[in-house]
């Protein structure tokens, strides 16, 4: 749909979260946290996608800030999954790395806009 870097990062991460959700339900029989991480992990990209057609620069920044809040929640659920040994360190680090890239890129975009 879009060649926007942050959009691609958000969408790719959402696809990974969908696969994680399936894995957690099918393999680990974990249904509570899996649903939580599914909601916030896919919401990151959804808010980024919504920001593309923002009504103003302020609206654009607001949508990106919402995606950051969702990313923070996603990190929390990832930590719980890892610290409770539901996912292993490799899974955790891989997802956390992608999430950190999204957070850093989003913060950089917001900071550039705010400096104008």
Image (spheres, rainbow, N blue to C red):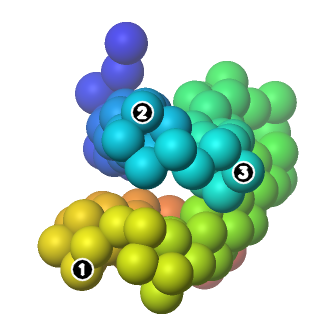
For residue 112, side relative to residue 76 (left or right): left
Q: Secondary structure at mark 3?
A: helix
Where residue 72 sits, quadrant-wise, is bottom right
x, y percent for residue 2 = 36, 21
Residue at horizontal 74 percent and vertical 32 percent from the top: 54
Residue at horizontal 43 percent and vertical 68 percent from the top: 86
x, y percent for residue 94 = 22, 67
N-term-proximal mark, 2 vs 1: 2
Residue 80 appears anywhere in the view:
yes
Q: Residues within 10 Å of mark 3 (few under 14, many from 20)?
A: few
Q: Which mark is residue 53?
A: none
For residue 83, side relative to residue 8 (left or right): right
x, y percent for residue 4 = 35, 36
- In the rendered image, the quadrant that contains the N terminus is top left
Residue at the disc numbered 1:
89
Residue at horizontal 82 percent and vertical 45 percent from the top: 59
Front position in the image: 101 or 60: 101
Q: CA distance from mark 2 to mark 1?
A: 19 Å
Q: Residues within 10 Å of mark 2 (few under 14, many from 20)?
A: few
Q: CA distance from mark 3 to mark 1?
A: 20 Å
Front position in the image: 27 or 106: 27
Question: Is residue 1 depicted above or below 38 in this figure?
Answer: above
N-term-proximal mark, 2 vs 3: 2
Residue at horizontal 24 percent and vertical 80 percent from the top: 89
Residue at the disc numbered 2:
26
Tell which residue pokes out farthest to the top in this image. 1
Front position in the image: 43 or 106: 43
């Amino acid at each position: 749909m879009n060649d926007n870097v942050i959009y691609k990062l958000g969408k790719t991460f959402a696809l990974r979260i969908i696969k994680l959700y399936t894995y957690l339900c099918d393999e680990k029989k974990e249904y509570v946290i899996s649903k939580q991480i599914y909601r916030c992990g896919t919401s990151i990209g959804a808010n980024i996608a919504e920001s593309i057609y923002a009504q103003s620069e302020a609206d654009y920044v607001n949508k990106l800030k919402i995606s950051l809040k969702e990313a923070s929640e996603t990190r929390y659920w990832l930590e719980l999954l890892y610290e409770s040994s539901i996912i292993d360190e490799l899974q955790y680090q891989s997802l956390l790395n992608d999430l950190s890239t999204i957070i850093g890129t989003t913060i950089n975009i917001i900071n550039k806009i705010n400096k104008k």
